[in-house]
Amino acid sequence: MCGIYGYKGVKTNAGSIVINGLKRLDYRGYDSWGVAVCADNALFVEKEVGKISDIRSLEKLPNGNCAIAHTRWATTGAVNTTNAHPHYSTDKSFVLAQNGIVENFDELKKMLVEKNYRFASETDTEVIVRLIEEKQKTQKSLLEAIRAAFLQLDGRNTIIALTKEGEIYAARNGSPLVVGKDTKTNDIFVSSDVLSFAPYVDTMAVVENNQMIQIGKGGDVSLFDVKDGTKKTFVFEPMTIKADTIQKEGHDHFMVKEIFETPQAIRKLLSQPKGTYEELANATKRAPHVYTIGSGTAGFAASQIAFYLRVFGGIRATNLVGADARSYYGLFQKDDLIIAPSQSGETADVMEVLEYAKNKKMKIASVVNMPGSMMTRMSDYPFMSEAGPEICVMSTKVFSSQIAWGYLVAKTLQEQYENGHKHLEFLAYALHTYLEQNQNIARVKMLAKHLARKQHIFLLGKYQNLAVVNEGMVKIVEGAYHHAHAIPAGDLKHYAITLMEEGVPVIAVVSDDVVKNDMNTAINEVRLRGAEVIAIGHKKQENYDYFLPVPDTGETDAIGNVVPLQLLAYFMAVELGNNVDKPRNIAKSVTVK
Ligand code: GLU
């Protein structure tokens, strides 16, 4: 899930330019980074373990007008400087960086070792480099050698290479690749996302799967089909996406700022035209079967969307988990609809299923927060979740706006769009008021201090609050690095009851009257065994040890209930001294399987 960046143009500080670009990509992985600059017919590389934001200076690198850079999220080979990208070819005539996983890495490496190629790192990336060298023996140009090697890679991979003559090559199969151009200077930027070069270009173009580009010595960009090698026309379109300069605006971390932006995100969603909801609602009705799909937080958003489609929309919607949807492949049929909420719009696990669904001629709807993503481009019904840039790696306001979107789709199906709109308007107002009241925040903060001392935390929910407690679990695990376990309230007695003993914390979301009695029973069962109950709901009861009140917004309660859980995870992370906006080992855009 790395980030790739490249620059070739008139400026001579290419090293600093790509580092600045990389800083905007560090949500994609931040265990190590590397830069290569081309100067005087040679390549100079600097690599380090750690965050790009910690880069002091690039003293070792010369000036040059051509450079590539990479931020790594290790999949193959430990996190160390040797394994960081870019990797040199044996004769140092080119360097290469990769985003993805070479799934046939073992087999290729074995073949190359037998041919006496030497490897400095443990990465699959270096296998690509050596494979290109092997292909250079028989192919007439580096372009052809890269193409031939790329065709032999299994898995979803995007690569970028820089030669000592100052040419850049990049090929894509899976992970994103975009090119930007400043038409006044002819400066060219290559990147994993458009926002990273948005301030410097006025036109852009997307490299599609199985395409590759060559930026020649003179800065001319050519596009090729990877499969047959034919040259294609590369059309740059005017750049419409603006780069926001995003600040914390007085908050200590982006996470809390973004939680506070939830009401605003919901309001923004409400400005989308009714017609687009109606179109999707009609497609949903026509579809023989409706699936929702996502990974991690978006996976629980997908689950909540499916809940709303069933309960309000009367649609038999099935929720799939991105990383484990294969058992449904045989059931996918033409005109089925698959709905994918995603923060980045490029999650590899989900993309793989969507590509399969597309081949089966299914329809795709997506609700994505990142502009210009692959998912949006492949969708028949593309929606934006309109939450605005989310910098914290842990997703908060995007989750809320995506489930609010799902609720509105379901209400449109019920022919209750206006009523749904009103409910969400009220929810946005109620959440705004909730977040404005210091005592609400103070309560969560105090509780977070208490929970930060507990290694295991249980969460109970049911019906509209089940996906919400699951999402609460995700946030606590991501932010606090503590073990959290969410369970449907009634299921608890079947197994996890064995873990209930003195002082075990159990968070129960009890706002829903439909399942009030069941929640109460579960609460009594755990309390009898000594557990301490933290309830999130509308009215305090005697059998709660702690109580976090939330606004009563009826049908949309679940959307609001996730907010105190997000705040709880935030304050726990702060209390524990964790890296709040960039938790260890995870990245925001998961473009590897
Ligand atoms: N497989 C490469 C590595 O481990 C790239 C990983 C990625 O794209 O996240 O270095």
Image (cartoon, rainbow, N blue to C red):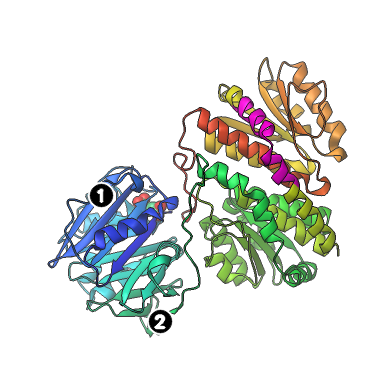
User: Looking at the rendered structure, which numbered label has been put on residue 358?
Assistant: none
Residue 525's place in the image compared with 357, above or below, is above
Q: Is residue 535 left or right of residue 357?
A: right
Q: Is mark 2 within 8 Å of ligand 1?
A: no
Could you tell me if residue 271 is visible in this image?
yes
Q: Is residue 514 left or right of residue 341?
A: right
Ranked by sequence position, the earlier of labels 2 and 1 is: 1
| C-alpha gap between disc 2 and disc 1 | 32 Å
Q: Residue farthest to the left?
A: 40
Provide the residue span drawn in magenta.
430-448
Q: Give residue 497's position: percent from left, percent from top.
A: 72, 24
Could you tell me if residue 112 is visible in this image?
no
Q: Give residue 534's position: percent from left, percent from top.
A: 71, 26
Split into 4 quadrants, where in the image is the N terminus? bottom left
User: Looking at the rendered structure, which numbered label has been put on residue 47?
Assistant: 1
Q: Give residue 91's position: percent from left, percent from top.
A: 14, 61
* Callout 2 crowding tier (Cα within 10 Å): few <14, some 14–19, many ≥20: some
- The residue at which mark 2 appears reads as 234
Residue displayed at 69% across by 68% down? 333
Q: Determine the secondary structure under disc 2.
A: loop
Residue 582's place in the image compared with 546, above or below, is below
- Residue 441 forms part of the magenta stretch: yes
